[in-house]
Image: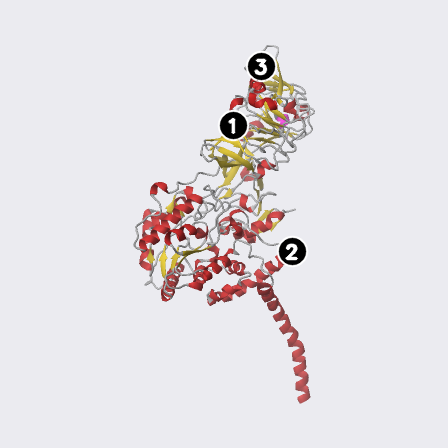
Amino acid sequence: MSTNKTAERKRFYKVFAPMLALFLVPILAVIIIAFVLPPVYDGTFLGELSEKYDRLEASDSPKIVIVAGSSAAFGLDSGLISEELGYDVVNFGLYANLGTKLMMDLSKANINEGDIMILAPELNSQTLSLYFNSETAAQALDGSMYMLKDVDSGEYERLVGALWGFAGDKLGYILDGTLPENAGAYRKENFNEYGDNTFDRPYNILTGYGNAITLDFRTDFTDGVTTDYEEYINYVNDYVKYVRKKGGEVYFSFPPMNKDALAGVSDDVIAEFYRNLVLSLDCKVISNIYDYILDDGYFYDSEFHLNNSGVTLRTVKLIDDIRREMSSDEAVMPVSELPQPSGKRPDCEDFDLVKLTDGRGWAVSGVTKAGHNKTYLTIPDEINGIPVTTLSDGALYGCGHLVLLTLGKNVSVVEEGAVENVKNLAGVIIPQGIDPRLLSLPERGFGDGCADGFKLYVSPSDYEAFKAADGFRQYAGIISLEESFEYGTDPSGSFAVVVSLTENGRIRSELTVPAEHNGLPVRLIDMDAFNGAELLERLYLSSNIREISPYAFAGAKEGLEIHLAAGTPLEELKLPENPDSLGLDKINIFIDWKEYEDYLLSDTLSGYRNVITSDNMYLKLERADDSSWTVTGLNDLGKLQDEIVIPDTVSGTPVRTIVADAFANTRLETLTLGRNVSRMDGWALRGSSVKTLIIPEGIGAGDVSVPNNMSEALATDGCDPGLKIYVDPELYEEYASDYFWGDYGRFLEKGYPE
């Protein structure tokens, strides 16, 4: 009997031991990966949490600690608070997705006699609740698991559940030899010693459109139902007791709120929320909610994030609020000295611009991603009504494709080094009417390191003035006529004819046939007129053109785009019998999008239907302003399409924005963004059938703004639940770890569909 029991015991251990190992090994592996292996997230935006926590633990009392989400990280000058109030300051705000509860719990790490804790969470359902995101928290704790001692033990179970996915992602980064990182304003390096995000934010970029602020919160502790908001109020009141027991005090303030995001909230709702909050909290509300509802011009990238001027304004308001509690009415700075709302970022497709110190002009400081890929660039005359006057040193650095640059008519200074080492640059065009005495060019010369035969092109009417100007003597050898075309006149002398290209015309990638020449309308393009246009990609015709001769484009670049002007009288236009007769095997004729259907139905152009196209065939567009289009929906033809590519530009103007419900109730399944789309509003895909969203190669997470925490807005409510968002594989990690795009992680795909 004993022998049988021993044998059974051995068999049991033989079976049980492998089963136990099978169960324990994965758990042990997860623990090792999570707690032992080197951190991978500590260099990201979330990795800043440990820096804030360490500062909190090391800070001497008395101190001021501001507990919030990203509205504090992007909304305070803690150095100014410290200087004005004489307290050490800790900016303990980072990311709403961590939840206000976690930040309150962690802030208990070092509370002492005389400390002031300021609660100023964002006013939305996520932060006015006990919301806790275990996945985000696990990433924020990576490499700093010692913070767990101050995390509410009630959250441990959820954190353990999140460790499996966290460990898998972390191991993937380690095996890959890469680290997640954030881009732009959301890089960890942008935080200073106080925990403030110091990324330069001079403009109000993309604000007031994402998460509308509703303020529909109520407390009724007698109805037997405890809402998420009531749970939050109770937790705050318990927090107040804890802080006071430690000798500190808690005050409630408000985050900055974009008034545009409150557009649908009545004054009665705001007043009721404010009153209800004051009556429900056991701590004092030291701020007036209306003081923190700010003009759109103070915000950056979110309805709660501030730009430079907004940071100063909000900080001054908070200092004044705290001072009142210290029995001091002294203001930080007079109202007349408070910063005014910033202007919009200059909307310039090709160039980065900065304001000159006198505020009277823009300087071109660099070239955008779109500009870097172009062979022909034109500096705008003005942006937002302010002239572009300066081309700064190094502005064209890295423009390896650039062949020709046209100055704007207001450019008066080209700094040393502005046009150097641009290896393919063949010339700079100075617009007609520029006084050479008012144009300052580099003293050491123009075009050093540019293409051989570099020219400075001026108009025929200005040629002699530039040749004779004292300031241009060193350029005398490279000054050339700007004219791109050679002209003739018809036998009757009633109109001008484009006969051929000049030297300048042959190096251009883009040309515009003028409406007139020497007082005569330009009506005809002659045979062989564009022979030698081997770089020409786009040709714009004026509405005066009435005839294009056979083989007018023989010898030009294959794939040439010919853009007919809006308003060209169709019944008077004469073209060769078919596209082949124009002299190229491949050619595209672009029609103004509002006239596209008329051209398709025209008998006059029946032989050209296969090459007639438009830069917008399917979209309904509205002008956002003079410099951009907004997609508001699809036209009748667009509603029949399964797949649509949003154009980069329409009629030469960038397509930048997609508004809510733009694709609602359509059969569209695949949508490709244009390279200039910089903003998708909340609910942009609501009610659509989109399964595939493609973001073009080279477009990073920081180039397309999406609402914070709005993955549901983009991907549900009628949108296919299997939506996939395809991004450049080289930029996938940037999207996955981006402050905003990270919320769309479950939809992101690395690379593009076959």
Residue hosting label 3: 495
Circle 1/circle 3 CB separation < 8 Å:
no
Q: In this view of the protein, can residue 616 be seen by the observer?
A: no
Number of the front mark, 1 or 3? 1
Colour treatment of the image: secondary structure
- On-image quarter of the N terminus: bottom right
Q: Is the magenta stretch mostly helix, strand or loop?
A: helix
**Segment tinted magenta in the rendering:** 606-610
Residue hosting label 2: 176
Considering only order in the chain, which callout, 2 or 3, is on the residue closer to the N terminus? Answer: 2
Considering only order in the chain, which callout, 1 or 2, is on the residue closer to the N terminus? Answer: 2
Q: In this view of the protein, can residue 20 be seen by the observer?
A: yes
Residue hosting label 1: 412
Residue 170 coordinates in the image, percent (x, y): 59, 59
| Magenta-drawn stretch contains 494 | no
Tell which of 510 and 110 is nearer to you.
Answer: 110
Number of the front mark, 3 or 2? 2
Circle 2/circle 1 CB separation < 8 Å:
no
Residue 323 coordinates in the image, percent (x, y): 33, 53
Q: What element carries label 2?
A: helix
Alpha carbons under labels 3 and 2: distance apart: 67 Å
Three-letter amino acid code at the position of disc 2: Asp
Asked if 55 appears above or below 335 in the picture, the reply is below
Graded by Cα atoms within 10 Å as few (under 14), some (14 to 19) or many (20 or more), the crowding at tag 3 reads some
Q: Is mark 1 on a helix, strand or loop?
A: loop
Asked if 205 appears above or below 84 in the picture, the reply is above
Q: Quarter of the image holding residue 343?
A: top left
